[in-house]
Structure formats: C-alpha cells, structure tokens
Amino acid sequence: QVQLVESGGGVVQAGGSLRLSCAASGRTFSSYAMGWHRQAPGKEREFVAAISWSGGSKYYADSVKDRFTISRDNAKNTGYLQMNSLKPEDTAVYYCAADNSLRAVRTGPDSISWGQGTQVIVSS
C-alpha cells in the first residue's frame, strides 16, 4: 500500500475556493489511481472524484461536477482537488484514497489506502 497525507483544508465562505493536496509515499504513486471521498457529520462517506494513474480518465460525483477538478503530478507524488464555488453542503472531512484499481478508488472499500483526512468547512 501507499501512505497518504492530505493538506489544504480550512474554513471558507460560500462561493470561495480551496485546493486540497494529497502527498503520497511508499509504493510507486504513479502506478496508482487516486481519488477523494468525503464524510459529513452524521452521514456516510461518499465518493467525490477519481483519476487514473495517467490522469487520462477522471470521474466526478454529480454534486461536484463543474465545480471541482481532480489532478495529479506524478513527478511530485501528489494529487490535488481544486474546489471552486463551494457550498455549505460541501462541508465534510475529505479523504484521499489510492489503489491500483480505479474502480476500487471510486467505490472506496476500507481495503484500499486512505489518508487521515482534512476538514473543510464552508460557511454561509
């Protein structure tokens, strides 16, 4: 597995932007698909976005499509989630995930690699 550390969370007003980063170490990050999930208080963890190892395939939840952009820099072993036009309902702990299966990154089983999470709070 690969070790993941998220950063970039914080408090932002509605309509604002944040960029989350996911720094990877351990196994070769460039061979792994990676993605983001989030968990709001009292809710189940849900899929946000995923990207293939090459960056050629990207997937988004309908709730964030056209507002969030997932990307990666394999030379830096880092993945990113650019979040624009943030809404209060985007408030959650955001988790980075990685696996050699893009499908697994999208479905998010406990068996894949996870970071510790970073808190995003969007105030109205």
Image (cartoon, rainbow, N blue to C red):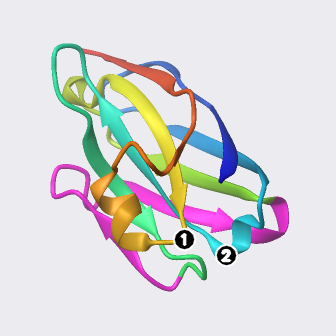
User: Looking at the picture, does residue 107 appear above or below residue 117?
Assistant: below
User: Looking at the picture, does residue 99 appear above or below residue 12?
Assistant: below
Front residue of 49 and 87? 49
Name the residue rendered at 34%, 70% in the picture.
103
Left/right placement of residue 8 relative to residue 121 reads: right
Name the residue rendered at 23%, 23% in the picture.
88
Left/right placement of residue 63 relative to residue 18 reads: left
**Label 2 vs 1, first from the N-terminus:** 2
- Cβ atoms under marks 2 and 1 closer than 8 Å: yes
Residue under label 1, please give it.
100
Name the residue rendered at 42%, 72% in the picture.
102
Residue 31 has which mark?
2
Q: Residues within 10 Å of mark 2 (few under 14, many from 20)?
A: some
Looking at the rendered structure, the kind of residue marked 1 is: Asn
The magenta-colored residue range is: 56-76
**Is 71 within the magenta?**
yes
Mark 1, secondary structure of its residue: loop
Where residue 20 sits: x, y (%)?
Answer: 57, 40
Q: Residue furthest front?
A: 111
Where residue 5 sits: x, y (%)?
Answer: 67, 36
Looking at the rendered structure, the kind of residue marked 2 is: Ser
Left/right placement of residue 89 relative to residue 100 reads: left
Name the residue rendered at 56%, 64% in the picture.
71
Residue 91 has which mark?
none
Front residue of 75 and 122? 75
